[in-house]
């Protein structure tokens, strides 16, 4: 028989590449195929935060937040050239979450995840501090400033794949897995070069389905596994406008609908605003910010900023699909962001399918 890899991985997003790096680092032989370019899926359309996810505390996701906070400083140490600390200003909005609740949430955020290097939360007087200047005068007087990190998400994926390759993993881009089947306890994955159309079959003792929004499609290519978990595709869009203010802090704004948005200094001359949360049932490759989402993001930012943001100010937009585990939550914003791993062993050899997760974790 031809070579049998220890592990074959379908999908070159953060999950597939992270697993390839980890497995190769442990001495396993690894084959990874990505149908487009590395990070061409959700992993390049994120808010680009290496963060614990302050708002998940409201959903009592303490373990998820703790794990992500621990990972935040580890990642920053590994890749300080593409990850930088960022301070976020969270203004208190009368009628929304009370100041004591924000303080409590930030106290937990500072303490549950082993923050060693990033500076802690501080209270800010938005009337006198420069971070209050871009905000509507007389409306916001009190706020908090806390730490998280910002990352070039696509580069993180590519560097992770590069490191996996340096440790011996075979990474194949423009290579789609078209059929998976099991023969005598070995996975056979037929892959097609999407440029030449050439097909080859590789063998592996174990298979990882890190197809992100395509996780269920991968399962349906002959795996013999009927997915027990369901993926919930939740669209998130961002708008980019010309730089809105001079200082280097980001904002977290609370909306009346209970959601939050981020306003982040971006690529020197721009400001990034996002995101949205809405169920999506189209082709993940064709996801695009809708007019409603653009209006929503402009209105949310304008609730706080002295100079309102309008759809005419939008220079570009991008949109991605979160491949979340469908936990039956009624609203897209409440669906868990946690990882769910489904392990199947049809015919003996394992197949691990990944739902949910974060760039950070
Ligand atoms: C709007 C938004 C904002 C977010 N913000 C953050 C954030 O700030 N911080 C954070 O930590 N996380 C964030 N996330 C979450 C994070 O981006 C995702 O959880 C993560 O990128 C998912 O990675 P993945 O590898 O599972 O999926 P993907 O990146 O989509 O990778 C899956 C890959 O599989 C490939 N593929 C599929 N089928 C096949 C096949 N048959 N053969 C070969 N290849 C195949 C696809 O081309 C794709 O590249 C955000 C997500 C969204 C949508």
Image: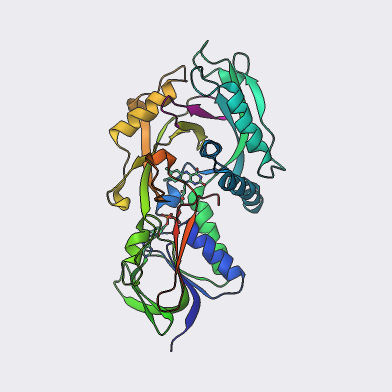
Residue 358 in percent (x, y) is at: 50, 49
Q: Main secondary structure of the magenta part?
A: loop
In the displayed structure image, the side of residue 184 where residue 253 appears, left or right: right
In the displayed structure image, the side of residue 77 where residue 326 appears, left or right: left
Residue 116 in percent (x, y) is at: 72, 43
Q: Which residues are magenta?
A: 245-259
In the displayed structure image, the side of residue 290 where residue 60 appears, left or right: right
Q: Quadrant of residue 150?
A: top right
Q: Residue at x 53, y 53 (%)?
A: 156
- Whether 53 is drawn above or below 31: the answer is above
* Magenta segment includes 45: no
Q: Residue at x 54, y 16 (%)?
A: 140
Q: How many marks?
A: 0
Q: Quadrant of residue 342?
A: bottom left
- Whether 150 is drawn above or below 186: the answer is above
- Viewer-nearest residue: 246 or 320: 320
Residue 247: tell me if it is visible. no
Outermost residue toward the left? 282
Residue 4 in percent (x, y) is at: 47, 82
Residue 161 in percent (x, y) is at: 52, 62
Outermost residue toward the right? 116
């Amino acid at each position: 028989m031809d070579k049998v890899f220890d592990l074959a991985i379908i999908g070159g997003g953060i999950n597939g590449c992270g697993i390839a790096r980890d497995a190769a680092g442990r001495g396993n032989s690894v084959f990874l195929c990505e149908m487009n370019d590395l990070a061409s899926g959700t992993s390049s359309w994120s808010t680009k935060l290496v963060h614990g996810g302050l708002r998940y505390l409201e959903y009592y996701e303490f373990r998820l937040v703790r794990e992500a906070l621990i990972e935040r400083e580890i990642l920053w140490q590994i890749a300080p050239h593409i990850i930088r600390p960022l301070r976020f200003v969270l203004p208190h909005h009368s009628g929304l979450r009370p100041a004591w609740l924000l303080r409590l949430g930030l106290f937990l955020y500072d303490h549950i995840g082993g923050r060693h290097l990033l500076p802690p939360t501080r209270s800010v007087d938005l009337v006198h501090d420069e971070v209050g200047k871009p905000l509507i005068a007389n409306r916001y007087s009190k706020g908090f400033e806390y730490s998280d990190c910002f990352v070039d998400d696509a580069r993180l994926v590519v560097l992770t794949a590069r490191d996996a390759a340096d440790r011996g993993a075979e990474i194949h881009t423009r290579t789609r897995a078209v059929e998976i089947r099991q023969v005598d306890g070995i996975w056979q994955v037929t892959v097609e070069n999407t440029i030449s159309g050439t097909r080859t079959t590789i063998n592996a003792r174990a298979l990882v389905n890190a197809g992100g929004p395509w996780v269920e499609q991968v399962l349906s290519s002959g795996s013999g596994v009927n997915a027990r978990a369901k993926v919930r595709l939740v669209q998130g869009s961002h708008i980019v406008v010309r730089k809105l203010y001079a200082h280097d802090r980001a904002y977290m704004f609370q909306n009346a609908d209970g959601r939050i948005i981020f306003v982040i200094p971006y690529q020197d001359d721009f400001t990034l605003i996002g995101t949205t949360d809405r169920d999506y049932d189209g082709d993940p490759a064709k996801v695009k910010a809708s007019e409603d989402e653009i209006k929503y993001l402009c209105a949310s930012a304008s609730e706080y900023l002295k100079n309102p943001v309008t759809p005419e100010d939008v220079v570009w937009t991008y949109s991605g699909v979160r491949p979340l585990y469908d936990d039956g939550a009624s609203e897209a914003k409440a669906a868990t962001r946690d990882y769910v791993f489904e392990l199947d062993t049809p015919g003996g050899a394992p197949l691990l399918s990944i739902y949910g997760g974060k760039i950070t974790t």
